[in-house]
Amino acid sequence: MGKMRLALIAGGTSGEREVSLKGAAEVARALDRERYEVIRYDPATDLARLAADAPGLDVAFILLHGLHGEDGTMQGFLDLLSIPYQGSGVLGSALAMDKNLAKTLYRLHGLPVADWEMAGPADLEDPGRILDRLRLPLVIKPVRQGSSIGMSVVRKAEELVPALETAFAHDAEVMVEEFVRGREITVGVLGNRELEPLPVVEIIPDSRFEFFDYEAKYQPGATREVCPADIDTRLRDRAWQYALSAHRALHLRGYSRTDMIISGDELYLLETNTIPGMTPTSLLPQAAAEAGYSFPVLLDRLIELALAAE
Ligand SMILES: Nc1ncnc2c1ncn2[C@@H]1O[C@H](COP(=O)(O)OP(=O)(O)O)[C@@H](O)[C@H]1O
Ligand SMILES: [Mg+2]
């Protein structure tokens, strides 16, 4: 068999363009050149070329985060071009990108989430409605963003309006969530029909960070990760069960990574990532390595799952 022609799609126009390009460089380095001929496409400039090349491409690897990449739009474009790709399809990608809809589905499936409210323009004039319904501290988030962009933690009532303004600058939809104090973990899942939960990773941002914000996520040494997390097996099993339920509830495929906070005896789901970070030291690749999938083997597996998807 000849080499597989693989479209590596990265860059794009979202706030996570730089993260995407960094990941793509690592993926390109790790992909087995005996198996794959790698052709790069940046959606910011190369969509027409991708469409023109489509008949000669065997598979795509989408390494885009955020809007116009992780949200189902690129997935729909590739569906129209009949190019298989790793990870979730249009529906699952769109659902997971929308933190409000994702939490609504988690809740319908009995998964614990922090209480939340959607904010509207009226709340900028009078934040009393939100402050009556939810207890401080609060986390203010754009509904469709990643990497903690536009997010703030509000500890005093007077901080709420400025935090809402910041979030509204990033998205027309903004949510306000109760802050959950506790240890943060993230749980990867791998597979199409048969799902394998990956070892749990605990994320420990340096104490100078209020939460796992953009800097804590990408500044080298800002965060310590422990895999497998030092938690008891009962909690681990529950984290696995929740990650699998979240993956199914959102109609995901191939892989996913669900962020959670341990508070007391319970785990609260924050969100599920459908295109998690993909450098060898990113969270899901670390967990996969602990499960025995080196980074190149993980990439092979994701591509194999892409080709097997129905
Ligand atoms: N309700 C919450 N309580 C405490 N911390 C939170 C809460 N929501 C988010 N965070 C913190 O903010 C980070 C980013 O939030 P998340 O919902 O995972 O969005 P994203 O990773 O897409 O930016 C989390 O990893 C966590 O550290
Ligand atoms: Mg997250």
Image: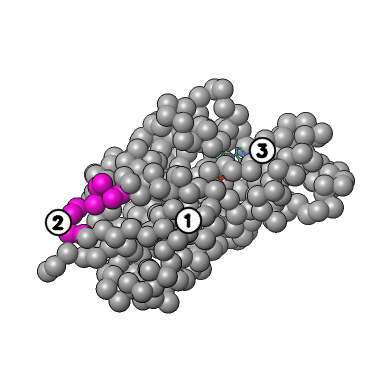
Q: Quadrant of the C terminus?
A: bottom left
In the figure, residue 77 lies in which quadrant?
Answer: bottom left
Question: In the drawing, what numbered circle is on residue 161?
Answer: none
* Identity of the residue furthest to the top in this view: 207
Q: Position of residue 15 (x, y in %)?
A: 54, 48
The region drawn magenta spans 27-36
Give yes or no for residue 280 being in the magenta stretch.
Answer: no
Which residue is identified by label 3?
152
Viewer-side residue, 129 vs 219? 219
Earlier along the polypeptide chain: callout 3 or callout 1? 1
Image side of residue 251 versus residue 164, left or right: left
Q: Position of residue 145 (x, y in %)?
A: 58, 50
Earlier along the polypeptide chain: callout 2 or callout 3? 2
Image side of residue 105 versus residue 159, left or right: left
Taking the spot 36% from the left edge, 74% from the top edge, the residue there is 52
Image side of residue 301 versus residue 68, left or right: left
Image side of residue 249 versus residue 38, left or right: right
Q: Residue type at mark 1? A: Gly
Which residue is identified by label 2?
34
Label 1: few (<14), some (14–19) or many (≥20) C-alpha neighbours in 10 Å: many
Taking the spot 77% from the left edge, 34% from the top edge, the residue there is 159
Q: CA distance from mark 2 to mark 1?
A: 28 Å
Viewer-side residue, 167 vs 201? 167
Q: CA distance from mark 3 to mark 1?
A: 25 Å
